[in-house]
Image (cartoon, grey):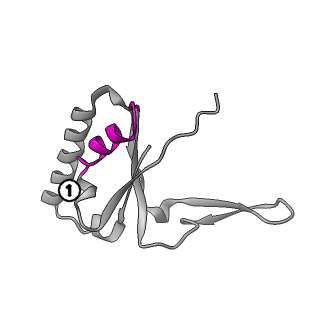
Amino acid sequence: MILIFGDEQQWAAMSPAEQQKKDEAHQAFRATAGPAVLAGEELEPAPMATSLRADATGRVTTTDGPFLETKEALGGYYLVEADDLDQVIALASRLHEVSAGHSGVEIRPVVDHG
């Protein structure tokens, strides 16, 4: 899984031209990746999140917003199928957020419980 992190304030401050450039970069990424992309979505901003936690008695409480306060938030993801990590690195290196300066990409294997 390719996780896309960045500074939400900078994403929100993008001009329409910058936003279009970012969107075109993602379209190019999807075109390059082709059928290797199994899923992918942009996420709503972190303040839209609802976090769940259970206390010691098992009582679940909900909190508006993300659990962690951090400058970088998870902004989206791609689930890709690849032969090895090198293939995913080559693909993920094409993402706009790798070189945007305020964002980055994390690659994590998905656990197969099957």
In the image: residue 61, left or right of residue 18: right
Given residues 43 and 31, the one toward you in this image is 31
Question: x and y percent of residue 88 in the render?
Answer: 35, 40
Q: Is residue 90 shown in magenta?
A: yes
In the image: residue 26, left or right of residue 81: left
Question: x and y percent of residue 12 in the render?
Answer: 29, 66
Q: Which residues are magenta?
A: 81-95
Q: Is residue 24 above or below residue 69?
A: above
Quadrant location, the N terminus? top left
Question: x and y percent of residue 81 in the render?
Answer: 40, 31
* Residue at the image position 28 percent from the left and 41 percent from the top: 91
Quadrant location, the C terminus? top right
Residue located beneath label 1 in the image: 19
Counting every numbered tag in the picture gives 1
**The disc labelled 1 sits on which kind of residue?**
Gln
Question: x and y percent of residue 89 in the render?
Answer: 32, 45
Determine which quarter of the picture holds residue 68.
Answer: bottom right
Secondary structure under the numbered disc 1 in the rendered image? helix
